[in-house]
């Protein structure tokens, strides 16, 4: 996915369950569902083959992280 500025690490989880926070200007003006679709599209192969569960927190750079 282009435009990703930061990704909070470490990614929590285990062998096939992950929780990720992604901050990107690409997410500005997009709904939560649209943001998740962008991430799922970028990770299509991994989701099909290696990831069982993925919890996402997607933010635009100007969003207040404490309220989302």
Image (cartoon, rainbow, N blue to C red):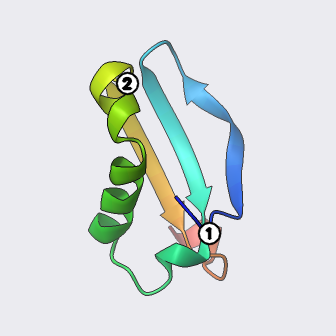
Q: Is residue 29 above or below residue 51?
A: below
Quarter of the view holding residue 66: bottom right
Q: Is residue 51 above or below residue 35?
A: above
Mark positioned earlier in the residue sequence (2 or 1): 1
Structural crowding at the residue carrying mark 2, measured as other residues with C-alpha within 10 Å and reported as few (<14), some (14–19) or many (≥20): some
Give coordinates of residue 29: x percent, y percent: 43, 87
* Circle number at residue 42: none
Give coordinates of residue 68: x percent, y percent: 50, 67
Q: How many marks?
A: 2
Residue designated by label 1: 3
Q: Is residue 19 above or below residue 66?
A: above
Q: Secondary structure at mark 1?
A: loop
Structural crowding at the residue carrying mark 1, measured as other residues with C-alpha within 10 Å and reported as few (<14), some (14–19) or many (≥20): few
Q: Secondary structure at mark 2?
A: loop
Give coordinates of residue 61: x percent, y percent: 66, 76
Quarter of the view holding residue 65: bottom right
Q: Is 23 situated left or right of 1 in this image?
A: right
Residue in view at x 49 percent, y 61 percent: 58
User: Looking at the image, is mark 2 or mark 1 nearer the viewer?
Assistant: 1
Give coordinates of residue 7: x percent, y percent: 67, 51
Circle 2/circle 1 CB separation < 8 Å? no
Q: Nearer the viewer, residue 55 or 45?
A: 45
Q: Is residue 17 above or below residue 45?
A: above
Residue in view at x 55 percent, y 68 percent: 59
Residue in view at x 42 percent, y 50 percent: 42
Whole-angstrom CA distance, mark 2 to mark 1, is 23 Å
Residue designated by label 2: 51
Outermost bottom residue: 29
Residue in view at x 57 percent, y 51 percent: 21
């Amino acid at each position: 996915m282009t435009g990703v500025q930061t990704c909070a690490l470490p990614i929590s989880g285990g062998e096939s369950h992950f929780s990720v926070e992604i901050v990107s200007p690409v997410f500005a003006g997009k709904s939560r569902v649209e943001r998740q679709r962008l991430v799922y599209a970028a990770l299509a192969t991994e989701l099909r083959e290696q990831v069982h569960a993925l919890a996402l927190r997607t933010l635009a750079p100007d969003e207040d992280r404490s309220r989302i």
